Amino acid sequence: MTIYFQKTYQRSFGTFPLKGNELHEAVQAAAQVGYRAFDTAQMYGNEAETGAALKATGLPREDLCITTKVDIANFDDARFLPSVEASLKALQIDVADVLLLHWPPADGDIAPSLKMLRQARDRGLARHIGVSNYTARMMRDARAIVDVPLVTNQVEFHPLLNQDKLLAAAAETGIPLASYCSVARGEVFKHPIFGQIGEAYGKSAAQVVLRWILQKGVSINTMSTKPANIRANFDVMDFTLSSIDMGRIEAMTATGHRIVGKDLVPYAPDFD
Ligand SMILES: NC(=O)c1ccc[n+]([C@@H]2O[C@H](COP(=O)([O-])OP(=O)(O)OC[C@H]3O[C@@H](n4cnc5c(N)ncnc54)[C@H](OP(=O)(O)O)[C@@H]3O)[C@@H](O)[C@H]2O)c1
């Protein structure tokens, strides 16, 4: 349950949309600066390359926290467990540290896929299970459907989007949030406030944004192809934003900039 609260695993390296040499190089750079949590998904089409890249780091398997996600196309009794087995084979691992449902199903009926996820855990295919892109209501409903802890709801989370309803649901259900699009795919850099705040701490705009996410009680998932950015994104544990700066950043959530919505993902739920 506490997996993402372990200091190292609070910072996960995302692999979407990386492939080929770019993925390989990024994973090596991430491992070198200290990342031990890595995030992939069936939908990314890069599980095998991620598995090979992680092998090439030489890191002991027990140090790694590997997350993958089941594609909604596999939310079917016949396909779910075989798809997870195929993911593990591609990743060259026996068990996923964290197995997530990538999206709620298009019809909004979350029970069947949650039960299949639970089965995957029971079969020893996953150490921990969780969800992604769930709404606050789905988080509350999920608690009643699954009788083991869901270790995360991985959602879009950055200072340009107010996610108070999800934070409230996280507090109520005990399902912690993890971020994706943590720097809003670069959109945060259009707002000078993050860099200005960073000056007082000797930190960059990206580091301020990531630190704000952590101080909201949300673990972070970032992706970068550049070694300097990869290092900077990991280097966010040695400063604390003041409550005043937290509040100044909080005010930016009124921007309401959502990246992953129905225009990108037509089956996305009606987000809070
Ligand atoms: N569960 C889901 O449905 C879902 C959806 C989307 C993403 N994800 C996961 O979350 C991960 C991260 O999200 P994301 O990649 O979509 O968005 P993101 O992390 O907000 O943005 C990545 C982009 O930001 C740039 N960047 C990263 N760090 C930077 C820094 N310190 N300074 C300047 N630019 C920086 C990167 O460019 P450079 O390469 O130039 O540094 C890259 O283009 C993904 O890789 C994936 O694993 C999950």
Image (cartoon, rainbow, N blue to C red):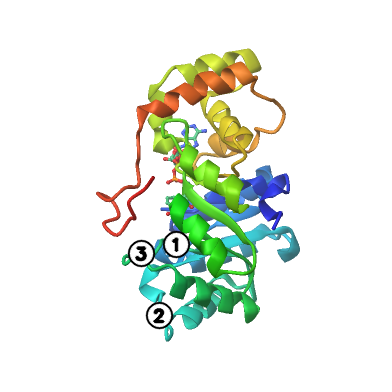
The span from disc 2 to disc 1 (Cα, nearest Å) is 14 Å
**Any mark on residue 108, and which?**
3
Mark positioned earlier in the residue sequence (2 or 1): 2
Q: Residue 179, relative to residue 162: is it above or below? A: below
Tell me how far mark 1 sits from mark 3, CA to CA. Answer: 13 Å
Residue visible at 27% across and 51% down in the picture: 262
| Horizontal side of residue 28 vs 264, given as left or right | right
Disc on the earlier residue, 1 or 3: 1
Which is more toward the observer, 166 or 133? 166
Assess mark 1: CB under 8 A from ligand 1? Answer: yes
Quadrant location of the N terminus? bottom right
Relative vertical location of residue 183 with respect to residue 254 in this rendering, above or below? below
Q: Of helix, strand and loop, which one carries label 1?
A: loop
Residue 224 lies, in percent from the top left, at 49, 42
Q: Position of residue 263 (x, y in %)?
A: 24, 49
Distance of label 2 from label 3 (alpha carbons): 14 Å
Q: Which residue is mark 1?
A: 102
Q: Nearer the viewer, mark 1 or mark 3?
A: 3
Any part of residue 50 in sight: no
Q: Give the residue type that dot 1 points to.
A: His
Q: Secondary structure at mark 3?
A: loop
- Is ligand 1 within 8 Å of the beta carbon of the residue shown at mark 2? no
Judged left or right of residue 118, residue 252 is: left
Q: Which residue is mark 2?
A: 76
Local crowd size for mark 3, using a 10 Å CA cut-off: few (<14), some (14–19), many (≥20): some
Q: Tell me if label 2 and label 3 are in contact, CB under 8 Å.
A: no
Q: Earlier in the sequence, mark 2 or mark 3?
A: 2
Residue 186: numbered disc:
none
Q: Amino acid at mark 2?
A: Asp
- Say which quarter of the image contains residue 109: bottom left
